[in-house]
Image (spheres, grey):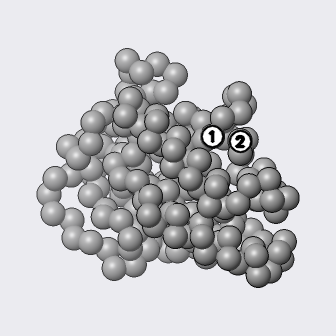
Amino acid sequence: MTASGILETPERLRLRETSVTGHVQSVLNAIRDRDPYLGAYVSVAGHEALRAAEAADARTARLGVAAWDAQPLLGVTVSVKDLVQTGDLPTTRGSLLPNGRAVADAPSVARLRAAGAVVVGRTTTSEYGWSTGTVGRVAPATRNPYEVRLTAGGSSGGAGAAVASGPAPLPQPPVAEPCLASLVERAH
């Protein structure tokens, strides 16, 4: 399946052009193929994302198109910036210093999951988000997908590279996208 945006993906899933599992697998494949030269992801939630996709497919088999009534983002893939806590993936904050493991999702991640979104990974950030370049100590520097000799820039460079390297939401030729959206929270 090719997806061109966050609005189109649920519609394509409702029309059964593909299963949620098939869609998520294509996204994970795109991450696997592109991330070695982009460095957008500090970790990929392969098994976790596929389990969530299988649960979504079971829900759609049971409820049909009504599955999207309570979960409008069912099957939409998202990534989470490595400064925002997730209960199933370590939060490093771009640092080698111990950060501990979150026992629960941050409220924003919990709301996305409750709406049916599938987290495919954590995007790279500079150490503690304090840099103009996306160069951390946990992962290689994140490259700009339009000019790989340049950094993606800033603490949200991993998120920007993850979204910009696929068609969503940018109008590019349709290919499987590494993620449809990326969650970046504002510092308090």
- Residue drawn 43% across and 74% down? 105
The local crowd at label 1, few if under 14, some if 14 to 19, many if 20 or more residues have their Cα within 10 Å, is many
| Mark 2: secondary structure | loop
Q: Residue at x 71, y 27 (%)?
A: 173
Q: Nearer the viewer, residue 133 or 149?
A: 149
**Left or right of residue 74, residue 48 in this image:** left
**Residue 133 visible, this orientation:** yes
* For the residues bearing labels 2 and 1, Cβ distance under 8 angstroms: yes
In the image, what residue type sits under mark 2? Thr
Q: Residue at x 39, y 46 (%)?
A: 41
Real-space Cα separation, disc 2 to disc 1, in angstroms: 5 Å
Quadrant where the image shows the C terminus: bottom left
Amino acid type of the residue tagged 1 in the rendering: Ala
Q: Residue 113 is drawn in which quadrant?
A: bottom right
Q: Picture coordinates of residue 51 (x, y %)?
A: 52, 70
Dot 2: within a 10 Å radius of its alpha carbon, few (fewer than 14), some, or many (20 or more) residues?
A: some
**Mark 2 or mark 1: whose residue is earlier in sequence:** 2
**Is residue 174 left or right of 186 when viewed as pictured?**
right
Q: Which quadrant of the figure has residue 55?
A: bottom right
Q: Quadrant of residue 15?
A: bottom right
